[in-house]
Amino acid sequence: MRLNNYQKMLEGIYGEKNHRDYTASDALLHVQEEAAKIDEGLRKDSREEIIKALPFLFCWLLSFCNMAGINAEKAVWTKYQGICPYCGKKQHCMCISAETKPKAWINNPQGTVPASLMDWQKMFQRIYGRINKMSWTIQIWLHFHEELGEISKEFRLGNKIKMEEEFADCFAWLIALCNKLEIDLSEVVWNTYPGVCSHCKEKKCKCDKV
């Protein structure tokens, strides 16, 4: 499915419940909570725990987008249009480690939005796979946490445009982790959320507040 379709699917399952029981701030705290479970998996060097936590992190990240009014696919594509937005390379970018980056992004009007979550993984692997292969897994994950902190900052300040930019980076680093660990994110997400709630198995979640 397209990234937008995952976002719509999760809104269909959890939207009514989330808007009733939570604020966008609560959803962002849930993102932090699920990210901490991946921290634990990395600390224990447990691939099983990481895979178990990934779909819940993905769900809450998109649920936060739904509650904050962010179109996830549009936000990511605005920055990552099939090329590195800083150097313009379509593959093997190495500039991500540079201390300073251009303020203006390079656009790619010839680019095509990835048609599935797996296609997003392939796109980011093509662009950043070489540098990520050279990086430690914990370095990649700390980048994710850094961008998650930036989302929190811009959310607190009410800057939606900057928040969307930081979400794009956060998503890119989440995909980088999956690529580094050779995890098919679409597979683990669908195994957990096959169009129904992961707990009550209903198309519209009927679970108690968690």
Image: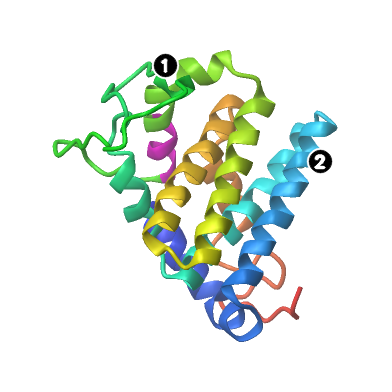
Q: Which residues are magenta?
A: 117-122
Residue 118, x across and y down, in percent: 43, 39
Circle 2 Cα neighbour tier, 10 Å, few/some/many (<14 / 14–19 / ≥20) = some
Residue bearing the label numbered 2: 40
Give the secondary structure at mark 1: loop
Dot 2 amino acid type: Glu
Q: Is residue 206 left or right of residue 125?
A: right
Residue bearing the label numbered 1: 94
Looking at the image, residue 80 lies above or below residue 94: below
Q: Is residue 197 left or right of residue 209?
A: left
Residue 108, x across and y down, in percent: 19, 35
How is colour applied across the structure in the image?
rainbow
Looking at the image, residue 61 lies above or below residue 136: below
Circle 1 Cα neighbour tier, 10 Å, few/some/many (<14 / 14–19 / ≥20) = some
Q: Is residue 198 magenta?
A: no
Q: Which mark is residue 22?
A: none
Give the secondary structure at mark 2: helix
Q: Assign the C terminus to one quadrant of the image.
A: bottom right
Dot 1 amino acid type: Met
Looking at the image, residue 144 lies above or below residue 61: above
- Inspect this view and state whether residue 1 appears: no
Depth check: give the residue in front, 79 or 159: 159
Real-space Cα separation, disc 2 to disc 1, in angstroms:
29 Å
Sequence-first disc among 2 and 1: 2
- Inspect this view and state whether residue 107 appears: yes
Question: Magenta segment, principal secondary structure?
Answer: helix
